[in-house]
């Protein structure tokens, strides 16, 4: 609980209009996009600048009050669920694009900027910001950085981390530091910029960001390849990459996902296919033309029954939009949708897809699989009902086996969703005890009072999907 004294001090910092501890206000921010997690915060605060954030953190450090930075709450690892109460920090006032620097190919923004708004602003100047998380219409840059978000273009262009050049961060003691800058080279000390990217708000509060931009690709072409079996689609992915072709997008959907997406989007997707690949290539026209011809040849050699090229940008955009709608489409089918992400080397995609299907059958579960096949990041998605405790127990066991299989194949427990609470008990499975211990040393050094998004990343107990109340 926040005392009357601390409450008054917080209001003095941000103003009455930016402090909310009403029951309705707290309820709104008691959960994020992760199923089966909910916990009431003690207050919602919307600072107007970095000075106010520094003052808030200093006060919270003094009184050991937890702080949970939150963007749009679209994360799927319970990363912004305030499981230990405290303050949820919003960035609705820090939502400005400060500068688009065409000479240095950078854009400087505040953390509350919506990803799509940034993308559109730089594209209006003929520039390109490639990271495109599925939630880009509502997710914020700050949230993208905290989770190191990926997206459909991750295969060719990388993820959020690859475009963060500099940060302004308020540390857990209230001090403000800057890292990196508009520099092509910088090896002055530890790479603190990369340390904060993907740290899920456990090390500090990001207040300003410098992002790298690149020139807009000259042209783009989109293909849809249909298969009668999952293994042929997976083999096509491996063969495309082995042929030294790196598509901008190389997405995979199995038949159950395809059926759900078509019912949702109604754009004429071929629901009779057991699997489809959505493939895009961009760049200079002659390279795109050459790569597309070779990709078509490869897909057909791996038993694709059809490879269709989008005949217009409208048709291509409809396919991309349908793929982005996969989670929404699946969520309509059952009361609870649990979307996970496990990543394996590209060469192991076929084995991973096969294993997911075998595990689903073993536990008698409805698991659909889609994802970024080109970078090995698959999203097994279980359609279930949280009220069925016996089935949820089977879901837990199934996902534990899926993560174990991913690691066995040389992969990881999460490629883009983050650790948060959901994956915390499996972190040691990937990093072993020494790796987790090293991370804890960093956390404890920067945040000795453990006020920054406590309870995330490091597990206290075995993994449980339960509703947590406070």
Image (cartoon, rainbow, N blue to C red):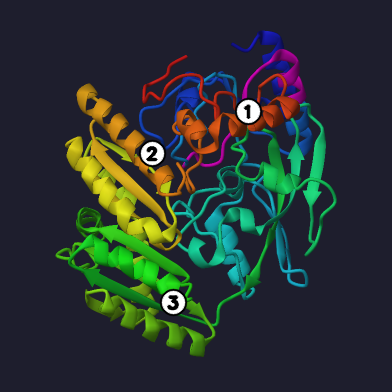
Q: Residue furthest bottom?
A: 286
Q: Residue furthest left?
A: 272
For marks 2 and 1, the one nearer the N-term is 2
- Report the Cα–Cα distance between label 2 and label 3: 30 Å
For marks 3 and 1, the one nearer the N-term is 3
Highlighted magenta segment, given as a residue range: 56-74
For the residues labelled 3 and 1, say whether their Cβ atoms are less than 8 Å apart. no
The answer to whether residue 212 is magenta is: no
For the residues labelled 2 and 3, say whether their Cβ atoms are less than 8 Å apart. no
Q: Residue at x 22, y 74 (%)?
A: 303
In this view, the residue in front, 136 or 98, is 136
Q: Secondary structure at mark 3?
A: loop
Q: Secondary structure at mark 2?
A: helix
Measured as percent of width and height from the top left, residue 232 is found at 25, 67
- Report the Cα–Cα distance between label 3 and label 1: 40 Å
Figure quadrant of residue 309? bottom left
Measured as percent of width and height from the top left, residue 52 is found at 75, 32
Q: Is residue 170 left or right of residue 468?
A: right
For marks 2 and 3, the one nearer the N-term is 3
Q: Is residue 155 left or right of residue 3?
A: left
Kindly identify which residue carries mark 1.
Answer: 437
| Residue 329 appears in the rendering | no
- Report the Cα–Cα distance between label 2 and label 1: 21 Å
- Determine whether 331 is above or below 394 in the image: below
Kindly identify which residue carries mark 2.
Answer: 404
Kindly identify which residue carries mark 3.
Answer: 243
The crowd level at tag 2 (other Cα within 10 Å; few <14, some 14-19, many 20+) is some
Measured as percent of width and height from the top left, residue 400 is found at 35, 34
Q: Is residue 12 left or right of residue 140?
A: right
In this view, the residue in front, 241 or 121, is 241
Q: Secondary structure at mark 1?
A: helix
Q: Residue at x 70, y 25 (%)?
A: 444
């Amino acid at each position: 609980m926040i005392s009357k004294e601390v409450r008054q001090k917080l209001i003095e910092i941000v103003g009455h209009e930016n402090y909310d501890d009403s029951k309705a206000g707290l309820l709104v921010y008691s959960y994020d996009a992760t199923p089966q997690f909910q916990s009431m915060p003690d207050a919602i605060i919307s600072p107007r600048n970095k000075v106010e954030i520094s003052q808030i953190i200093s006060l919270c450090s003094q009184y050991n009050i937890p702080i949970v930075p939150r963007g749009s709450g679209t994360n799927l690892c319970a990363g912004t669920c305030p499981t230990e109460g405290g303050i949820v920090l919003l960035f609705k006032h820090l939502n400005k694009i400060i500068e688009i620097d065409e000479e240095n190919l950078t854009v400087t923004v505040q953390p509350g900027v919506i990803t799509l708004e940034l993308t559109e602003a730089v594209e209006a100047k003929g520039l390109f910001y490639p990271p495109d998380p599925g939630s880009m219409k509502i997710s914020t840059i700050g949230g993208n950085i905290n989770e190191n978000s990926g997206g459909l273009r991750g295969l060719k262009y990388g993820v959020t981390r690859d475009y963060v050049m500099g940060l302004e961060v308020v540390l857990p003691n209230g001090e403000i530091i800057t890292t990196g800058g508009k520099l092509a080279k910088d090896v002055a000390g530890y790479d603190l910029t990369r340390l904060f990217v993907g740290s899920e708000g456990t090390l500090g509060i990001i207040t300003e960001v410098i992002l790298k931009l690149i020139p807009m690709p000259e042209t783009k072409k989109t293909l849809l390849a249909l298969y009668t079996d999952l293994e042929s689609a997976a083999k096509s992915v491996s063969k495309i990459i082995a042929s030294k072709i790196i598509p901008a997008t190389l997405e995979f959907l199995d038949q159950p996902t395809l059926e759900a997406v078509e019912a949702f989007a109604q754009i004429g997707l071929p629901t009779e296919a057991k699997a489809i690949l959505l493939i895009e290539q961009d760049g200079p026209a002659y390279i795109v033309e050459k790569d597309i011809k070779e990709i078509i040849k490869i897909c057909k050699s791996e038993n694709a029954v059809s490879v269709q090229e989008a005949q217009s940008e409208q048709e291509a955009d409809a396919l991309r939009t349908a793929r982005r709608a996969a989670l929404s489409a699946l969520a309509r089918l059952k009361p609870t949708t649990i979307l996970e992400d496990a990543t394996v080397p590209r060469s192991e995609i076929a084995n991973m897809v096969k294993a997911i299907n075998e595990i689903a059958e073993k536990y008698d579960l409805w698991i659909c699989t889609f994802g970024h096949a080109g970078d090995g990041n698959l999203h097994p998605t279980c359609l279930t009902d949280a009220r069925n405790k016996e089935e949820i127990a089977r879901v837990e066991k199934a996902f534990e086996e899926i993560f174990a299989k991913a690691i066995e194949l040389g992969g990881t427990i999460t490629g883009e969703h983050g650790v948060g609470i959901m994956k915390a008990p499996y972190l040691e499975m990937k990093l072993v005890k020494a790796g987790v211990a090293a991370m804890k040393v960093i956390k404890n050094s920067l945040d000795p009072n453990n006020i920054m998004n406590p309870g995330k990343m490091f597990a206290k107990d075995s993994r449980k999907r339960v509703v947590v109340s406070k």
